[in-house]
Image (spheres, grey):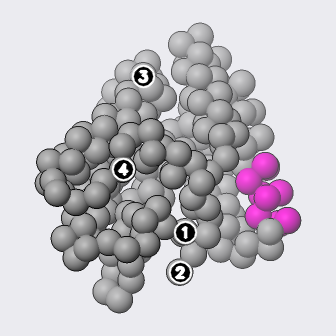
Amino acid sequence: MKLWPMLLLAGYALTVHLSVSYGYPLPAVLALAALLLLSLVQAIVRRDRSSLVFLALYVLATLLMLRFAGLYGMLFLPPVALNLAAALFFMRGLLPGRTDLITRIALHVRPHRSARVLRYTRRVSWAWMWFSLALALLSAMLAVAAPLEVWSLFTNFINYLLLGAFFGAEFALRHIVLRGEPTAGLRETLQALSRVDFRRMFQP
């Protein structure tokens, strides 16, 4: 797992919030366009057809938002799309006959797991799926009904704090529910996650 996508995401979130705070959306729109172009180049280099299709649909949706909601409308889409994409990733692994994402990560970190642990990891995938859907829905509701400053504060900061809090709460719960099972500490968990190839993990 590389660090630079997280840095880009953090830079984009800060740019959007500053653009909203100063009432000048153009820098955030240009940052969004740059991220989409970078994603497009990567998809072409990798010859990733599914990513190209997704990007084409995303660009179409962005243009529709521009048409009906202006420049700020273009900025409403990424928080919803990111959380919805996360929910879909979790949902795909929860379909019958598939291995859920959290179980895949757990087996990648430690190949031999008990049935008790695997039942727990599958439930965690369900929890992440519903949590991601809730964040997507809340982001969409704030875009429609809340002041721009409130929407920006939530989607660019609070959203990520909630993700971190959810991760921390699950980490603590894991050590309670799986007491007696070998579980990794926080440092070991983060080190293991940094070595996971999530792009390969998302493949069927």
> 175 left or right of 39?
left
Q: CA distance from mark 4 to mark 1?
A: 20 Å
Which label sits in the foreground, 4 or 1?
4
Q: Residue furthest top?
A: 22
Look at mark 2 in the image and give the residue it sits on.
204
Look at mark 1 in the image and give the residue it sits on.
201
Q: CA distance from mark 2 to mark 4?
A: 26 Å
Spot occupied by residue 10 in the image (x, y as percentages of width and height): 59, 30
Q: CA distance from mark 1 to mark 3?
A: 31 Å
Q: Secondary structure at mark 1?
A: helix
Q: Which residues are magenta?
A: 37-45
Q: Residues within 10 Å of mark 3 (few under 14, many from 20)?
A: some
Task: Tell me the kind of residue under disc 3.
Answer: Leu
Look at mark 3 in the image and give the residue it sits on.
153
Q: CA distance from mark 3 to mark 2?
A: 35 Å
- Please tell me which of labels 2 and 4 falls first in the chain: 4
Residue under the point 19% across and 71% down: 116
Look at mark 4 in the image and give the residue it sits on.
184
Spot occupied by residue 135 in the image (x, y as percentages of width and height): 34, 44
Residue under the point 59% across and 16% down: 18
Spot occupied by residue 165 in the image (x, y as percentages of width and height): 31, 34
Spot occupied by residue 117 in the image (x, y as percentages of width and height): 24, 67
Is residue 137 placed above or below 14 in the rendered structure? below
Task: Tell me the kind of residue under disc 1.
Answer: Met
